[in-house]
Amino acid sequence: MSALQDDNASATKKDITELRQELKQEIAGLRQESTQNTASLRQELKQGMVQMEDRLVEKMRDMQTEMLRAFHNWASPTDIKLRGHEDRIALLEQRVFALERGELPPQAR
């Protein structure tokens, strides 16, 4: 029976040294793998956050466009009404100035 197959055989200093060396190599490999995984995860997280920010900015621009369209749709008829009122006020002012000067006001068109 060899020493590797006999579970009851005593470990030699050489066996323990080899085991320590193997464990150190395994631990070093795990640390390296962990570091690589961490860097990869950080990169993925950062990329995901950038993509999320891009989507958020796009949504905000869409909302802004919708708001501007709504205000424009509301303001257009109001602006037309105001221009009509401004024209009437201008005509009334002309008539009042003519009256103040003692002239006959211009006839309404």
Image (cartoon, rainbow, N blue to C red):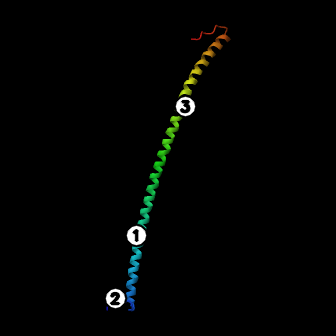
Q: Measured along the vertical axis of the image, is residue 42 above or below residue 90?
A: below
Tag 1–tag 2 contact (CB < 8 Å): no
Return the x and y of residue 38 as percentages of the image width and height.
Answer: 44, 65
Which residue, given by chain and number where applicable, does mark 1 sit on? Answer: 33
Residue type at mark 2: give it. Answer: Gln
Residue type at mark 1: give it. Answer: Glu
Residue type at mark 3: give it. Answer: Trp
Return the x and y of residue 59 as percentages of the image width and height.
Answer: 48, 45
Residue at image point 42% right, 69% down: 34
Q: Quadrant of residue 9?
A: bottom left
Q: CA distance from mark 3 to mark 1?
A: 61 Å
Return the x and y of residue 93 as percentages of the image width and height.
Answer: 63, 16
Q: Dot 1: what SS?
A: helix
* Residue 97, label in figure: none
Q: Nearer the viewer, mark 3 or mark 1?
A: 3
Q: Dot 3: what SS?
A: helix
Q: Quadrant of residue 102?
A: top right
